[in-house]
Amino acid sequence: MYGLVNKAIQDMVCKYHGEDTWETIKRKAELEDIDFFIGMDSYADDVTYRLVEAACEVLNTPAHEILKAFGEYWVNYTAEEGYGELLASAGTSLPQFIENLDNLHARVGLSFSELCPPSFECEHQNDHSMKLHYQSNRKGLAPMVIGLLHGLGKRFHTNVDVIQTNFREQGDPHDIFSIKYSDSQSNDQ
Ligand code: HEM
């Protein structure tokens, strides 16, 4: 994955656990030869998976929790790292933004030519719920999607309730999430 992702993991770990913990994680992942990640360079996916695995061991936290926290972190991180306008152009409400996720990644792909983005498809059920189909060439990242959706909920001041209903790792064709959302200013569901 692009270095931007690894940089964001580093940023999150340093912010919440400090530089020393980051160095320990990097060493455990056998990445001590990398002084810093370059956002626009493409790295093997294995680098990112090793960082997550090492973070699990060092922080004594399961992978799904780390990935969920990372997904939530990513929304603010990209907004602050020069992708604010891109995020703003993808929509002004949670459902509109989710509908535009593939367009957003297509635009990201204009600058990141080796991008291998996920694909999302919405099945709207009513004004407050949808099924979200997530397809990826990569494995194990569904918890990150849950975190991303919560991060987007915060961005749009929207309460979000996400349940995963279909699991690729259990033999389903792809991951599906059931999402319920409502304006956090109102109480209607
Ligand atoms: C402007 C904001 C964003 C940028 C710049 C961005 C960029 C990227 C990049 C560079 C990757 C790594 C893929 C690769 O290197 O091949 C990625 C992966 C991913 N992105 Fe985005 N992204 C953004 C917002 C979002 C949002 C809001 C979501 C919400 C669902 C999302 C969902 C994902 C997921 C789930 C992956 C993991 C890869 C996979 O599933 O195969 N991204 N994105």
Image (cartoon, rainbow, N blue to C red):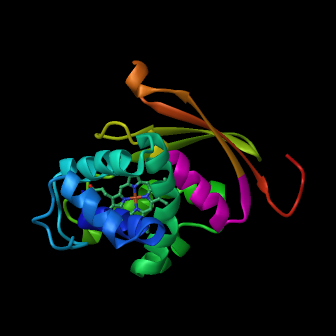
Say if 128 sits above or below 27 in the image. Answer: above
Residue closest to the eye, 31 or 40: 31
- Region of the chain picked out in magenta, as a range: 145-159
The residue at the far left in this view is 33
Say if 52 sits above or below 90 in the image. Answer: above
Give the residue at x 44% y 65%: 17
Say if 168 sits above or below 36 in the image. Answer: above
Is residue 28 one of those drawn in magenta? Answer: no
Residue closest to the eye, 129 or 124: 129
Give the residue at x 50% y 54%: 69
Q: Is residue 145 left or right of residue 169?
A: right
Instruction: From the image, give the main secondary structure of the stretch colored magenta.
Output: helix
Q: Is residue 161 left or right of residue 83?
A: right
On the question of residue 185 being in view, the answer is yes
Give the residue at x 32% y 69%: 20
Q: In this view, does 15 lie to the left or right of 99?
A: left
Q: Looking at the picture, how far across and down is residue 45, in whole percent?
A: 21, 49
Displayed-image quarter of ligand 1: bottom left
Q: Looking at the picture, how far across and down is residue 186, in whole percent?
A: 88, 59
Q: Quadrant of residue 154?
A: bottom right
Q: In which quarter of the image is residue 23?
A: bottom left
